[in-house]
Amino acid sequence: MPSPETPAPAATLWHRLNPLTKLVAAIATGVAALIAGGLLIPLALIAGAVLLPAASAGVLPRLMRAVLVLTLPLAVSVLVVNLLFFPAGQDVLFRLGPLTGTADGLRYGVEVLVRLLALSGGVTLFYLTTRPGDLTLDLERRGVSPRVAFVANASIGTVPAILERAEAITQAQRARGLDTEGGLLARARGIVPIVGPVILGAIAEVERRTLALEARGFGRPGRRTLLWEPPDSGAQRAARWAMVLALPLLAVLRATVGLP
Amino acid sequence: MTLVAEGLSYRHAGASRVALRDINLSLADGEVVGVVGANEAGKSTLCLVLAGLAPRVVGGQLAGRLLIDGEDVAGLAPHRLAGRVGIVFDDPGTQLSGVAVTVYEEVAFGPSNLAVGRAELIERTEWALDLLGIRALAGRDPARLSGGQQQLVAIASILAMRPRHLVLDEPTAQLDPAGTALVGEALQRLAASGVSVLLVEHKTDLVERLASRVLVLDGGRVALEGPASDVLVDPRLPGLGVAPPARVRLRSRLAEAGLESPALLEAIAAASAASVSAPQGPASAVSAGGPA
Amino acid sequence: MTELRLEGVRFDYPGGVRALDGVDLVIRPGERVALVGQNGSGKTTLVRHLDGLLRPTAGRVLVGGVDAAGLTVARLARTVGLAFQDPDSQVFASSVRAEVSFGPRNVGLRGATLQAAVDWALESVGLAGEAATNPFDLGVSRRKLLTIASVLAMGTPVVILDEPTTGQDLRGVLRIESILDGLTAQGRTVIAITHDLRFAAERFDRIVGMRAGKMILDGPPETVFAASAWPALRTTWLEPPLPALVGERLGLGSTPTDESLVAAVGSTGGAALSG
């Protein structure tokens, strides 16, 4: 079998981009949408910097699903709240008992939503097309301390681990008669028996992990040998700078000339 | 090449009681020494001390000498000991680095920390994967393996740092029978490769199979020590909180009933040999105990 | 008296993994049942159906003749006490006594009844002298005994222990065995998940073997460890206990325990041994 010391060559051009390039693209997309405001530019960003690359990388359906799950609750509340309660709302669209829907509210709600989608879409695209760990390898190659890179990488994996643990603890306490299906008071009583072991367990696990890491030479100061290095190129470096520099330019344009 | 402890005593930080008291032991190349004893007898602490994690990482006070090939290494930083003494813990999950996407990268993590050259990093990683028979798992996500497979990865990850001595703290405690069989087979291969092994285990059947010498710890001291064939039949074992191997228990039960006979002993010996070598289930390190 | 009954229980985890695949099982009051099988074979999934932590995708679970589907976990916990395998996923109180009181308090015990239940449970697991100790000052093996005490104190007619002997030394195992005897003497039903087949053979009336979500063996140790069942055992990496292997070799029939082998050898007067 092929030796997996380096990951199999990624399927698509977008996948093959340097992780830092993809990260800068994701953040720049979101920030640009925030700065630009309005509808046209954020929509263009979503189309050009999120949907198009996602389609070219073959992750468009997964991206849509993930973004939907992540932003749907927030999107609905943003739309409803603005539609009904936008303070300066003038053009009345409809009245429903004491509630009034305004066109200004709707328009503002959609603007917020579009910016939200640009941000979450960009970040999701990064996650869907980057092998976990590649970003840290790349950062280490650029001289970031192995410890910092390790913490950054490990903390990405921590949240699901804690949620999994909390679920196991909840099950164990329910088996001991803890009522989590009852009223608010009953649920409140369950906080200590569930959160307690989550915290204590996390502390104990840090101790065990520290020992295991030390035993594997992680305490050694200085550079580590990298198994492989995510490739980079002059063009990508230029593209990253261009994206970063475009942001203040966009802000200046908006303040002076105005944007659509 | 030997690992020698001379008069090792150790006290945990803030503890009034001494955890280890005047331990003397030696571990020669290719030798497997079993360590058994009741819970809280000091077995895990001994592992931490031998691997240089106590007192350097966990604190506490150490007295005595720890010699590797004649050099006193007591108190040396763990990363300076990592290429000489390796340690494997009981919990398969928390030994993973948490940052590796594949088994290959997981196994490479240790030697990459030691900053060996890139060619050597690859060579060591593949050597360790082959030694444990887990080359076929190389591309898998370590977090999604069975407990037994994760322990094999943990052992390979330590061996890739090329220690001559390996300390294992109840490596099968959290495994099912399939996982225990996998680790048992791997340890046999290891010993044959010349690595010396100190194996802490409750499962005396496994110790009997693997170890040539056995130490029994009790209250931080060595209570019994000698060839496995003597120590594991010692009538004092149960009093020290250790369950003798199944073969030994059965023989002593028959002897109590006055029923021991050469034919019976022969049947017991044959049955225990057969049960050890029985190819239980789908016997491949890689297919066995796959994740649900 | 509480009978436990699973009728055609199937369970699929979200994502589609089938963890139980048509389990029919009746456990009568006062029975002592060992569940054996590889990790992932469905043992833990099965017992979690008995206290409602998991609900069947298809089929029914009856506890004391009542369909568990209509009962909350908190309600079922008054009947079925389940001790989880990992103490660190449940211990939270700052003293051993407070930890053990949590379960019985949840199921409604108060005052002197509560005190008595807690005292008895601590006594059973040998932690009576540690009532004021912080659980985290106990070693992990004693913390595990503490979690068993936490469930014993609930006084449920059914007690389920998930791998009780794992990580215990000889004294701990003997302690668990005496706890089992105490529970049986009180007429309680005991179910234990275990990987230790010797423990299962010596201490249980009935052994249920699981593989890939199905029951593949069910019967007393003499049946489950008889030579005819070995092929089935070995398909799931379970090796029969040594006395069973020796008895078969000597033509003494099924002798799953040291005691049964000694009795079988004794009854032949040594005649079997020349062959």
Image (cartoon, coloured by chain):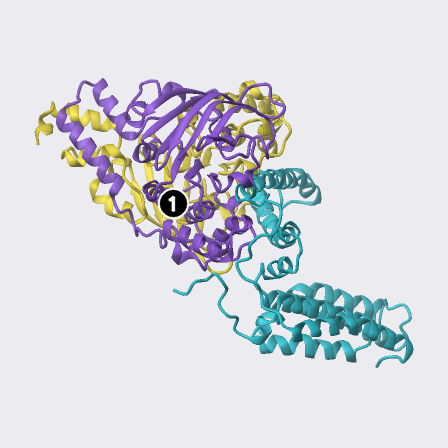
- Is residue A94 shown to the viewer in this render? no
> Which chain hosts label 1?
B
The residue that mark 1 highlights is B179
Quarter of the figure with the N terminus of chain A = bottom left
Considering only vertical position in the picture, is C110 above or below A41? above
Q: Position of residue C100 (x, y in %)?
A: 57, 28
> Would you identify the image quadrant in which residue C238 lies?
top left
Q: Which residue sits at x=64%, y=79%? A: A52
Q: Residues within 10 Å of mark 1 (few under 14, many from 20)?
A: many
Note the chain letter of the cyan one. A
Note the chain letter of the yellow one. C
Q: Position of residue A195 (x, y in %)?
A: 65, 41
* Secondary-structure class at tag 1: helix
Considering only vertical position in the picture, is B53 above or below B140? above
* Residue B19 as seen in the image, left or right of residue A51: left
Q: Colour of chain B?
A: purple
Q: Which residue sits at x=35%, y=27%? A: B214
Inspect the image, locate mark 1, and give the three-letter code of the amino acid beneath it: Gly
Q: Which residue is more in the foreground, C215 or B36?
A: B36
Please, which residue is most extreme toward the front here?
A: B70
Q: Which residue is more in the foreground, B241 or A237?
A: A237
